[in-house]
């Protein structure tokens, strides 16, 4: 009996073996290199195996008929193949293609510092800007601690890589902002009109930026506003220079916010002596409102509006005879509105549209003689983005920008008002493609076409960026582009046929980034052409014969890992630049440029005390200035002392809803001199008298108490709201 059972068992095993299918093969990448450890599986079954060290595999299955083989390995796309299991041995050659991971893969970084974008790690968040000592929560003030920028203390604006403050353009949700800085008295710094906590992300490009952004010769500051808020909240700020109150109301798929603020510097100036002879210190009233609405599954509509009214009066003293003074009265009215809508049309197509309106008016009186300057503009844009595959993304769009400008003044001699004005319509189209060839190489190419309706001239500007990541962390980037911008209003109003000024950027970058450390070194060359030039020194007779260059090298290091509860960064920039433009008789270093700029920012979080301490040290090497007492062959050869500043701040949280904030700029009271201005007429000895351009006060002290009133739940946790 035993023998038949054994025979039956052997026969059954034989028939079972005859019913199995043997599958063998090899797994390799596109270069032919073996991939060990890949998972091979028959879909919807438990049959499979893993590839050996040489990429080979072999297994058997009882499955029959048409089945799907899946082969997967981390970092590669899944391989699938339909096979026919008919009892015959199968040989499968598997070639896995690398999967492009845009989050961890190589990114374009030449010329760009980004924050808040999911594809890129953070450089500066809103809280970084707000807590940087010396910046006093001003976006430009914090960005001036990054390489490529420099401190120009008499303006407070962004001066980037040999470009003046007018060459940086600000965009909110892709829409242009005209007059992004508030008014200021002569030779005193102005502040940006927008606070950092309005935005979820900041992209600051010192060159080589996208073809989407035009009318920016040197730099683009792109601010992305917040989405729908998640809780009801009221914020109250009691400041040493005024007060403000804000409220946010949240609904199921929408939120609305409003803020009103008042500032009056008179009490502060009565305590701190000022270099400026104020009659009426600056007073301003500012308000803003925002509305966010989710549309459908993934669409969102955003609206933002801002208004500001400010005024001040001061006395300008004559340089030759300081006892002679002139009353300077300035009244500013500003309005800005921005609406945008974005929506996924399909899983691979999305659209963005936007419309913005800017209005800025200055009324100035010099000893009672009125002058007025007004600019308003409308910007409309539509963009389509398409993900062709996980390796190719394209976008293209059109935009229209029109701005109106008018300047007028009362002429006492004729008893009439003289005015100059122009209207400049700009139409542009752009297209750009980003190709992820692998996780080690990416390329972005674009082109921008623009037509200026004022001078009737068209232009075509190419942009190109490449990035290569040889290892796991470090990467090289290269960028090239042509950029152009209309001349400043005070020149176009005299000659509306002027061509746009041009710049050509060449940038090479190496960067290593981890989650908590960043090292970056970048070199660049920038060529200027068609700059505004005065004919025979006459500022009313203009041409585009000016030119110039800027080149340099920059270093950046940020570390918030080595020392517990400490975040710091160091940036250094070397700049070599010259221009022959405006009234320059020869090629010379412009007065706003310094060869060496260094910033050291340090932040220490003391958790047990609920306190943060911050320090910033800034250095700028001597800047050139024009001394009319010297001959023309010594133009812009005199130099100021170096600029140095140590600033400090402290933030204390005695309660979760209460912040006490103190800051002091120029803590050591250094007498920084930004240049010299000279009398228009020589004295009796034939010498032009001079006066140093200094800080308005040795220090600026700021104290703020911020109170937040909110429910400790997000809108998603509250039912029926």
Image: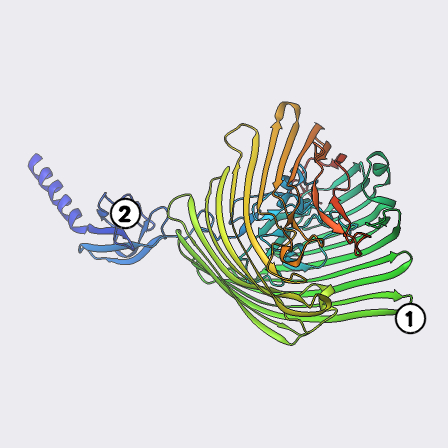
The crowding category of the residue bearing disc 2, from other C-alpha atoms within 10 Å (few below 14, some 14 to 19, many at least 20), is many
Residue 227 placement (x, y as % from top left):
65, 50
Specify how the rendered protein is coloured: rainbow
Label 2, secondary structure: give it: loop
- Which residue occupies 73% across, 62% down? 357
Foreground: disc 2 or disc 1: 1
Residue 481 placement (x, y as % from top left):
52, 62
Instruction: State the mark number for residue 93.
Output: none
First of labels 2, 1 by sequence position: 2
Q: Quadrant of residue 413?
A: bottom right
Is any part of residue 423 visible from this angle? Answer: yes
Label 1, secondary structure: give it: loop
Which residue is the extreme one toward the left?
Answer: 3
- Which residue occupies 78% across, 49% down? 689
Can you say which quadrant of the picture contains the N terminus? top left
In the displayed structure image, the side of residue 413 where residue 647 appears, left or right = left
Residue denoted by label 1: 414
Residue 235 placement (x, y as % from top left):
76, 39
Residue denoted by label 2: 35
Total count of labels: 2
Residue 168 placement (x, y as % from top left):
64, 56
């Amino acid at each position: 009996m035993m023998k038949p059972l054994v025979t039956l068992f052997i026969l059954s095993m034989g028939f079972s073996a005859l019913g199995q299918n043997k599958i063998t093969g090899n797994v390799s990448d596109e270069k032919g290199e073996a991939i060990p450890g890949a998972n091979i599986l028959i879909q919807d079954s438990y049959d499979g195996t893993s590839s050996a060290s040489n990429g080979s595999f072999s297994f058997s299955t009882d499955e029959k008929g048409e089945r799907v083989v899946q082969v997967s390995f981390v970092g590669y796309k899944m391989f699938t193949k339909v096979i026919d299991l008919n009892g015959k041995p199968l040989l499968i050659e598997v070639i896995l293609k690398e999967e492009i991971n845009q989050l961890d893969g190589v990114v374009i970084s030449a010329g760009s510092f980004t924050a808040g974008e999911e594809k890129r790690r953070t450089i500066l968040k809103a809280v970084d800007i707000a807590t940087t000592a010396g910046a006093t929560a001003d976006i430009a003030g914090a960005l001036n601690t990054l390489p490529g920028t420099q401190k120009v203390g008499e303006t407070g604006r962004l001066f980037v890589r040999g470009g003046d403050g007018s060459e940086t353009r600000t965009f909110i949700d892709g829409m242009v902002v005209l007059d992004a800085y508030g008014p200021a008295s002569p030779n005193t710094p102005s502040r940006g009109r927008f606070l950092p906590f309005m935005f979820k992300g900041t992209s600051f490009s010192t060159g080589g930026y996208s073809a989407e952004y035009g009318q920016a010769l040197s730099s683009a500051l792109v601010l992305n506003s917040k989405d729908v808020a998640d809780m009801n909240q009221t914020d109250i700020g009691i400041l040493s220079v005024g007060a403000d109150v804000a409220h946010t109301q949240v609904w199921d798929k929408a939120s609305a916010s409003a803020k009103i603020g008042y500032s009056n510097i008179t009490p502060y100036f009565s305590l701190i002596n000022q270099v400026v002879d104020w009659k009426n210190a600056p007073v301003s009233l500012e308000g803003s409102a925002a509305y966010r609405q989710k549309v459908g599954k993934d669409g969102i509509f955003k609206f933002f509006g801002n208004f500001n009214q400010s005024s001040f009066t001061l006395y300008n003293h004559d340089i030759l005879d300081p006892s002679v003074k002139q009353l300077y009265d300035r009244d500013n009215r500003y309005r800005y509105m921005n609406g945008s809508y974005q929506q996924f049309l399909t899983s691979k197509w999305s659209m963005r549209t936007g419309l913005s309106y800017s209005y800025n008016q200055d009324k100035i009186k010099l000893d009672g003689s009125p002058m007025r300057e007004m600019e308003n503009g409308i910007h409309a844009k539509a963009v389509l983005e398409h993900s062709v595959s996980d390796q190719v993304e394209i976008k293209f769009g059109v935009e229209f920008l029109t701005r109106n400008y008018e300047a007028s003044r009362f002429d006492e001699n004729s008893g009439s008002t003289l005015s100059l004005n122009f209207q400049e319509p700009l139409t542009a189209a752009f297209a750009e493609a980003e190709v992820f060839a692998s996780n080690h190489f990416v390329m972005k190419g674009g082109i921008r076409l623009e037509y200026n309706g004022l001078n009737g001239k068209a232009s075509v500007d190419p942009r190109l960026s490449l990035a290569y990541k040889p290892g796991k962390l470090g990467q090289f980037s290269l960028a090239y582009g042509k950029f152009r911008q209309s001349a400043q209003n005070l020149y176009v109003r005299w000659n509306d046929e002027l061509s746009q000024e041009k710049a050509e950027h060449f940038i090479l970058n190496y960067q290593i980034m981890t989650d908590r450390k960043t090292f970056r070194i970048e070199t660049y060359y920038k060529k200027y052409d068609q700059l505004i030039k005065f004919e025979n020194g006459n500022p009313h007779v203009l041409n585009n014969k000016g030119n110039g260059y800027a080149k340099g090298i920059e270093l950046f290091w940020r570390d918030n890992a080595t020392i517990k509860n400490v975040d710091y960064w160091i940036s250094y920039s070397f700049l070599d630049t010259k221009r022959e433009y405006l009234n320059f008789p020869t090629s010379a270093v412009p007065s706003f440029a310094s060869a060496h700029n260094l910033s050291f920012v340090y932040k220490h979080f003391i958790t047990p005390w609920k306190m943060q301490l911050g320090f910033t040290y800034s250095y700028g090497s001597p800047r050139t200035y024009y001394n009319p007492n010297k001959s023309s062959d010594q133009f812009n050869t005199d130099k100021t002392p170096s600029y140095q500043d140590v600033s400090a701040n402290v933030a204390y949280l005695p309660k979760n809803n209460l912040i006490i904030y103190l800051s002091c700029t120029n803590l050591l009271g250094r007498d920084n001199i930004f240049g010299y201005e000279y009398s228009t007429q020589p004295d009796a000895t034939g010498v032009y008298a001079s006066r140093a351009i200094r800080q308005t006060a040795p220090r600026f002290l700021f104290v703020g108490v911020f109170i937040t009133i909110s429910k400790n739940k997000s809108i998603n946790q509250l039912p029926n709201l």
